[in-house]
Amino acid sequence: MRMASNPDAPVLELRDVSKSFGAVVALRSGTLAVSRGSVHALVGENGAGKSTLVKIAAGVHRRDGGTFRLDGEDVDFTSTADSKAAGIAVIYQEPTLFPDLSVTENIFMGRQLLKSGRRIDKPAMYAEADRLFRGLGVRIDPRRPALGLSIADQQIIEIAKAISLDARVLIMDEPTAALSGVEVDRLFAVARRLRDEGRAIVFISHRFDEVFSLCDTITVMRDGAYIATRPTAETDVPEIVGLMVGREVSDLFPKQETEVGEVVLEVEGLTSTGVFHDVSFTVRRGEIVGLAGLVGAGRSEIARAVFGVDRYDAGSVTMRGKAVPASDPRAAIRAGMAFVPEDRRHQGLVTEGTVAENIASVIRTHLTRAGLLTRARENRAVAPWAARLEVKTGALDMAAKTMSGGNQQKVVLAKWLATEPDLLIIDEPTRGIDVGTKAEVHRLLSELAGRGLAILMISSELPEVLGMADRVLVVREGRLTADLPRDEATPERVMAAATRDRNDEEAA
């Protein structure tokens, strides 16, 4: 690794950096100072300016003002190549490898090792790739094709590539959003190895448990400006949340007491061979039922089958006492169901479409007259829903792809609430959105339940399940292992039901 010209200076330093895109000010005063041999968290709500600051460090954008230094020396990158050459690497949430090339070819793309006659030295490249992986403490076959690799393995390959380029600063942008618990643990072990080697890591995440577990220091941004930096050991979640949102967020889970009414959804003996088995439960009017369990337990698959997206082999689904045909989402919608999927960008939104087009997509047939739908009629129909969910957009004709994750989630919610459903199935309601927007979504779900909507909520965040659910159903390996009322749903009981053997559960 290249030696620092000034060992006492931060390896990466941005001070009062500004950036505008036309009339839009994306960054007013961004500041970040990262020391070598440390993991430094960069946190803030969506739109706080984190991504713009990172893109300036990565050479994607040039700053309009402020100071940018590496090892105490002023720099000004005009391209991503400049940034990489200087020793900065960005590890994105979803890396883009060449799927038809091998792992090793991806690592050494454009800079292959050569032997005499300028022929590519594949054995030397394989050996070097293997050495890189061993140094990171992971096992990946250097010869296997990249096609079919998990997101976690792809990220490790990007890290290996960065180390092969002698990167001294690694920026990890929401790296754990699509990873399982085991994969997160492996990534953190790699990050700690890199820190102990003296490299600097910038870690961007909305997950506070990860930030406090991994990071030495936390820098907070809000509204395009630097707010504060705190040693992790000297702060806590409430202080960081308050700095992020500019107000005290004492209750991230504003749960209202509601009057639970009659059964809306009844699932009986639902079975999909090899996926889930003999699943039975109910959801009542005004009730939020949380579906908890480990990643891969079958929670999302159960929800998709109930809504008719996926097939099932046995069992029944009824809405208000009437059978809902299997494998027929349109029938589920007609019966009064709404479904917000886990992957909102690919399954819940038409990202190229506008806000109005997305919100109106399910109710469009009801808005047409003589087969025609005018823009004015569409806007009149969707504007109240956009306003009700406080979608932060200046116009209904804004493209959905340009919005923050939190606003995209609100658009998907507005789309389904516009159908005026009796049951809302919502999978990972706050994944990938900031803490302030999380509180807004939680408040909305609580208000909807208070108005009599039945809600089935799937979440991988146990505090979210415990904070919002009136009743918690626990899934383990495709089976329901517990049905816990709110006052009995403790973290210990939920995790015990999610991890213990079913025979032990029945014996208990």
Image (cartoon, rainbow, N blue to C red):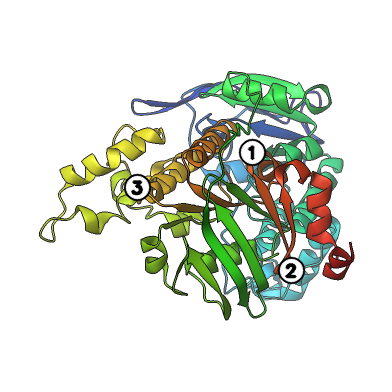
Q: CA distance from mark 3 to mark 1?
A: 29 Å
Seen from the viewer's position, the closer of residues 274 and 30 is: 274
What residue is at 69 percent from the left and 64 percent from the top? 296
Residue 406 image point, x, y percent: 49, 40
Seen from the viewer's position, the closer of residues 274 and 494 is: 494
Q: Is residue 293 left or right of residue 340?
A: right
What residue is at 29 percent from the left and 54 percent from the top? 363
Q: CA distance from mark 1 to mark 2?
A: 28 Å
Specify which label sits upstream in the sequence, 1 or 2. Answer: 1
Please report contact status of discs 1 and 2: CB closer than 8 Å, yes or no.
no
Residue 94 image point, x, y percent: 58, 55
Label 3 secondary element: loop
Residue annotated with mark 2: 477
Residue 148 image point, x, y percent: 62, 72
Q: Vertically, is 66 above or below 292?
A: above
Q: Quadrant of the C terminus?
A: bottom right
Give the label on residue 149, or none: none
Residue annotated with mark 3: 418
The residue under label 3 is which amino acid type? Ala
Specify which label sits upstream in the sequence, 3 or 1. Answer: 1
Residue annotated with mark 1: 206
The quadrant where residue 254 appears: top right
Q: Vertically, is 66 above or below 42?
A: above
Specify which label sits upstream in the sequence, 3 or 2. Answer: 3
